[in-house]
Amino acid sequence: MAVPTVVTIQPQYGGAMSSVSRCTWQTGLMDCCTDCGVCCCGMFCFPCLACQVAGDMNECCLCGTSVAMRTMYRTRYNIPGSILQDCCSIWWCGPCALCQLKRDINRRRAMGIFW
């Protein structure tokens, strides 16, 4: 009788990318200079950027700056952290946290691993 195959590691979407880049933030919280367009939008039109992020994630525009949105994104991509860290990032560095989230979305989209 044949032994059934047990899958212990699920196949990952995205091809040849390393798992390290999939499971970390693509840029740091204070890496605003890596994408000046996102940074300027976050500093001068924060509500517009929040709406863009929420739209990218198929959520309501009012959710773009929430701790829940950041936590959901982290959970979706297995990015290490906690709800407390998300809360502190949003509370004390709101524009930077939102810019980091948008930069991450843009990079994952360019790599073909944003879903």
Image (spheres, rainbow, N blue to C red):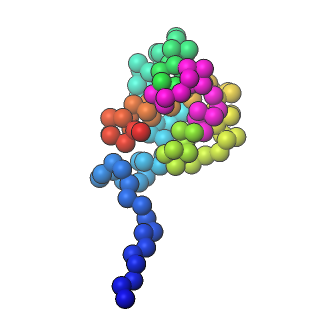
Examine the structure image and report whether residue 86 is included in the region drawn in magenta. Answer: no
Residue at 29% from the left image edge and 52% from the top image edge:
16
**Residue 75, x across and y down, in percent:** 56, 45
Q: Is residue 37 above or below residue 89?
A: above
Tell whether 58 sits left or right of 1.
right
Residue at the extreme left of the image, as rendered: 16
Q: Is residue 12 visible?
A: yes
Q: Is residue 105 above or below residue 25?
A: above
Tell whether 99 sits left or right of 14.
right
**Residue 60, x across and y down, in percent:** 56, 23
Q: Quadrant of the C terminus?
A: top left
Residue at 39% from the left image edge and 75% from the top image edge:
5
**Residue 18, x across and y down, in percent:** 36, 53
Tell whether 84 sits left or right of 64.
right
Q: Which residues are magenta?
A: 56-71
Name the image quarter holding residue 98. Answer: top right
Q: Quadrant of the N terminus?
A: bottom left
**Residue 101, x across and y down, in percent:** 50, 31
Q: Is residue 64 above or below residue 22?
A: above
Q: Nearer the viewer, residue 35 or 19?
A: 19
